[in-house]
Image (cartoon, rainbow, N blue to C red):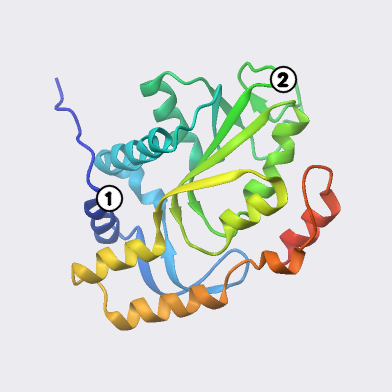
Amino acid sequence: MAAEIKSLSLQELVLKLFDVKGLKFGRFVMRTGEVTPIYIDMRVIWTYPELVVSVCEHIWDLFERKNISCDLLCGLPYQGIPIASYLSTKYNVPMLLKRKRPKDYGTKQFFEGHYRADQKVVIVDDVLMTGGTIVEDIPVFRDEGLSVEASVIFFDRQQGGMERIKHIHGVDTHCVLSLSDALQFLLEAGKISQETVDATHQYLSTNRFDTAKYGVELGTGNEELIKQVNNCA
């Protein structure tokens, strides 16, 4: 029988992510066209069972510390799906599978799995940037009568995603690891320089989603404003 895989401490996990190039420093162009000095590539963890276990166990530990409960877990495609699958099978919490877009055949639905209106859902994912995906997805859950209780994310890039989701939908977001803490772990281990830390913090200070620009009371039924906000991120 294979030996049980033990979870790494958060500091050990960050150092391992750096070693396997899950954390990269340089000049990177994001999907939005934004240029960033750091790239977080959590896709590399699936080659390393120790990292998979560690990421998922730290997420579950956050569930317990924050007393987060739900009827259903839902990992956002694609990185959130295997995280939710791990948590669902290990901790016996039912899971929904969400598609990026509804099928154009058969049942033509967004979700796979059994659920009913008024059930409580927690969204899980790997990295939070400005929160655009979750902002767009919460109405999809609500259209099915599901209540999104919270979103739980492993890595927070600290670019205003938590505040944005709360501001638009009133949903709390909890993250295991902040970019600031990751930078400190790497600096203390001699993996990066103080210059790299300072440059990254400077980037963060000028590349955040600014909720102050949208100072109206928001909630469900604000589809046009949500589109406007998303176009600014």
Name the image quarter holding the N terminus: top left
**Identity of the residue drawn at 34% across and 41% down:** 58
Task: Identify which residue is drawn at 26% across, 51% down.
Answer: 13
Residue, x 78% and y 51% (percent of image)?
218
* Distance (Cα) linking label 2 and label 1: 37 Å
Q: Does residue 136 show up?
A: yes
Q: Quadrant of the C terminus?
A: bottom right
- Residue 53 vertical placement versus 223 (above, below): above
Q: Residue at x 38, y 66 (%)?
A: 180
Asked which secondary structure carries label 2, the reply is loop
Q: Type of residue at label 2?
A: Ala
Specify whether 152 is left or right of 103: left
Which disc number belongs to residue 152? Answer: none
Count of residue discs: 2
Q: Residue 7 location in percent, x, y?
A: 23, 39
Q: Could you tell whether 133 is left or right of 41 in the image?
A: right
Specify whether residue 78 is in view: no
Residue that badge 1 annotates:
10
On the rendered structure, is 101 left or right of 201? Answer: right
Q: Characterize the local packing of mark 1: few (<14), some (14-19) or many (20 or more) Cα atoms within 10 angstroms.
A: some
Q: Is residue 173 left or right of residue 8?
A: right
Report the residue marked by disc 2: 117
* Nearer-the-camera pick, 120 or 54: 120
The residue type indicated by label 1 comes to Leu
Mark 2: few/some/many CA within 10 Å (<14, 14-19, 20+): few
x, y percentage for residue 77? Answer: 56, 40
Most extreme residue toward the bottom is 195
